[in-house]
Image (spheres, rainbow, N blue to C red):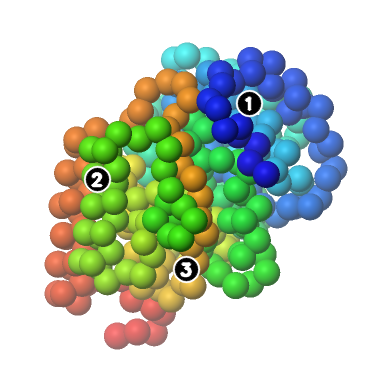
C-alpha cells in the first residue's frame, strides 16, 4: 500500500517527531541509502523523511541541502540529531540537481552503501514504492531499477496535457536517438547497485535535472548495467514550486544530440577492455 494517500494533503509539520520515534536498530534494509536532495523543501521534508524511514526499515536517509533559505537544512539537522538513521550533507551553493545527486552518491558510497536510491523530496515519488525499486537490486536481478511512468502499470497524476507531452516526448526522443531500452529516461526515482553507480564516471556529467537522469542511465547501460523498470504513479508536488523550466528542456535536447554525436565519433562510454 502506498504511504501517500489518494487525496493530496498538506504535510504534517510534526512528522520529524515521528521519524525520531522509529526504531533505529531495525535492519531490514541495512546497506540501503536514500539520497534526498533538497532546496526550499521545508514544507515537505519532515513528512517525506518519516515515510521513507518507515518504508525501508534499517535504511540510511541522506538529506543533501543546497543552503535552502527556508530552513530546510536546519530541519534536517534536528532530524539527524533525533535519529541516527538520518544524515545531512550541507552544500553552500545551488549547482543543479545533478551536482547534488553526484555529491550525495559519493557520500553514500564512501559510507559503505550497497544500494543507493535517488528520489525527490516533494512527494512526486511515493515512498511506498521504495521496496519495489530496491528489491530487484537486492535479489540480483538488476543493477539499476527505474521507477517508470511509461511502462505497463505506471502513470502520472495531476499533470496538464502540455507537461505530459513534454515528458513523454523527451523520453521517446532520448530512447530513440541513444538506442536505449527503458521507456522512462527523464524520471529521477531510481535504485542503483553501488558497484554499478561507482563505475559511472562523474567527470563531464551535466548538472541539469532531465539531462542528468538521461545521461546517467545512458552511461550505465553502455557500461553493461542490467536495467529494469518497475511501474510507479508519479504525482505533481504537494507543496512548493516546480523546478522544471524551458532551459532544462532545451539543455536535455542538445545534450542528447551531443551524446549521440560523441558516440558516432567513437568517443562514447565503453565497457572496461572495450576498444
Residue 144 drawn at (x, y percent)? 51, 63
Quadrant in which residue 268 is drawn: bottom left
**Residue named by callout 1:** 47
Q: Residues within 10 Å of mark 1 (few under 14, many from 20)?
A: many
Q: Earlier in the sequence, mark 2 or mark 1?
A: 1
How far apart are the alpha carbons under marks 1 and 3? 30 Å
Q: Secondary structure at mark 2?
A: helix
Q: Closer to the camera, 15 or 237?
A: 237
**Residue named by callout 2:** 165
- Residue at 73% x, 39% y: name it: 54
- Residue at 33% x, 76% y: name it: 270
How far apart are the alpha carbons under marks 3 and 2? 24 Å
The correct choice, above or below, for 263 with respect to 212 in the image is below
Q: Secondary structure at mark 3?
A: strand
Q: Residues within 10 Å of mark 3 (few under 14, many from 20)?
A: some
**Count of number-bearing discs:** 3
**Residue named by callout 3:** 227
Q: Earlier in the sequence, mark 3 or mark 2?
A: 2
Looking at the image, can residue 90 be seen?
A: no
- Residue at 38% x, 39% y: name it: 97
Q: Closer to the camera, 106 or 38?
A: 38
Kindly indicate whether the residue at mark 1 contacts the one at mark 2 (C-beta within 8 angstroms). no
Q: Earlier in the sequence, mark 1 or mark 3?
A: 1
Which of discs 2 and 1 lies nearer the camera? The answer is: 2
Which of discs 3 and 2 lies nearer the camera? The answer is: 2
Which disc, if any, is residue 134?
A: none
Q: Secondary structure at mark 1?
A: helix
Looking at the image, can residue 220 be seen?
A: yes
Amino acid at each position: 500500500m502506498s504511504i501517500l494517500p489518494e487525496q493530496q494533503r498538506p504535510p504534517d509539520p510534526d512528522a520529524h517527531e515521528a521519524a525520531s520515534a522509529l526504531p533505529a536498530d531495525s535492519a531490514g534494509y541495512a546497506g540501503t541509502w536514500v539520497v534526498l536532495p533538497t532546496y526550499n523543501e521545508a514544507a515537505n521534508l519532515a513528512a517525506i523523511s518519516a515515510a521513507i524511514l518507515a518504508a525501508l526499515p534499517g535504511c540510511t536517509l541522506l538529506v543533501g541541502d543546497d543552503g535552502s533559505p527556508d530552513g530546510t537544512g536546519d530541519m534536517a539537522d534536528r532530524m539527524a540529531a533525533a535519529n541516527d538513521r538520518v544524515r545531512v550533507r550541507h552544500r553552500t551553493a545551488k549547482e543543479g540537481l545533478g551536482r547534488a545527486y553526484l555529491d550525495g552518491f559519493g557520500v553514500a558510497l564512501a559510507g559503505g552503501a550497497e544500494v543507493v536510491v535517488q528520489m525527490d523530496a516533494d512527494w512526486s515519488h511515493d515512498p511506498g514504492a521504495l521496496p519495489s525499486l530496491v528489491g530487484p537490486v537486492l535479489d540480483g536481478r538488476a543493477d539499476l531499477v527505474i521507477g517508470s511512468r511509461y511502462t505497463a502499470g505506471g502513470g502520472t497524476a495531476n499533470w496538464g496535457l502540455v507537461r505530459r507531452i513534454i515528458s513523454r516526448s523527451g523520453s521517446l526522443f532520448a530512447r530513440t536517438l541513444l538506442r536505449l531500452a527503458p521507456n522512462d529516461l527523464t524520471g529521477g526515482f531510481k535504485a542503483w547497485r553501488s558497484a554499478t553507480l561507482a563505475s559511472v564516471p562523474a567527470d563531464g556529467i551535466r548538472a541539469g535535472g532531465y539531462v542528468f537522469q538521461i545521461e546517467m542511465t545512458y552511461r550505465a547501460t553502455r557500461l553493461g548495467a542490467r536495467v529494469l523498470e518497475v511501474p510507479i504513479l508519479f504525482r505533481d508536488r504537494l507543496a512548493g514550486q516546480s523546478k522544471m523550466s524551458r532551459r532544462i528542456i532545451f539543455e536535455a535536447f542538445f545534450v542528447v544530440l551531443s551524446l549521440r554525436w560523441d558516440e558516432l565519433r567513437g568517443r562514447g562510454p565503453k565497457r572496461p577492455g572495450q576498444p
